[in-house]
Amino acid sequence: MSALTTKRLVLRHLTAADAPFVLRLLNEPSFLRFIGDRGVRTEAAARDYLATGLWARYADVGHGLYAVERKTDEAVLGICGLLKRDTLDAPDLGFALLPEHWGQGYAHEAAAAILGQEVPALGLDRVLAITVPDNTASIALLTRLGFRHEATPGDATVERYVWTR
């Protein structure tokens, strides 16, 4: 995928230069609480995480998580994109922003770009999203994007949402 653009944002592939940002994001208390500990504690580990995780996904399945960059100052605010998990029957929308960028509509704008531009380009009709039950901000965002709650068979630790075109 080439970069996606919105009024305020550019969604682009992450690069090695993004390793300090990735290190910070993956160690934010909110990321650890709501998404999980990826065990990334150094910039070198962040570069490895990019190479073996995110960049490999771009090559393997043609999509992945992208840097969410603000146009006005090129600040990287977070990540957003489609993930392919072996445990799910469709790609799922993932997003995480640094806390200082919450509540400004950036996550909604980035996720809407994924759903409105990348999903059709990939020929997808269905996208999932998963979150822990107490992540009320993410659940509210998914609802605003048009996702609906779906039963999560056998796992009360995650909530499953589905979006269809």
Image (cartoon, rainbow, N blue to C red):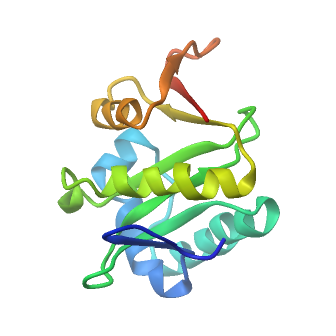
Q: Residue furthest right?
A: 60
Residue 137's image quarter?
top left
Q: Camera-side residue: 67 or 5?
A: 5
- Residue depicted at 57% across the width and 12% down the height: 151
Residue 49's image quarter?
bottom right
Residue 141's image quarter?
top left
Rendered-image quadrant of the C terminus: top right
Q: Camera-side residue: 5 or 95?
A: 5
Q: Is residue 147 above or below residue 85?
A: above
Residue 56 placement (x, y as % from top left)? 74, 68
Q: Is residue 158 visible?
A: no
Count of marks, rendered view: 0
Q: Camera-side residue: 75 or 71?
A: 71
Q: Is residue 86 visible?
A: yes
- Residue depicted at 45% across the width and 31% down the height: 146
Rendered-image quadrant of the N terminus: bottom right
Q: Is residue 161 left or right of residue 28?
A: right
Residue 8 placement (x, y as % from top left)? 31, 70
Q: Is residue 71 left or right of residue 84?
A: left
Q: Is residue 117 above or below residue 9?
A: above
- Residue depicted at 30% across the width and 79% down the height: 75
Q: Is residue 147 above or below residue 114?
A: above
Residue 52 placement (x, y as % from top left)? 70, 69
Q: Is residue 119 left or right of residue 69?
A: right
Residue 143 placement (x, y as % from top left)? 38, 29
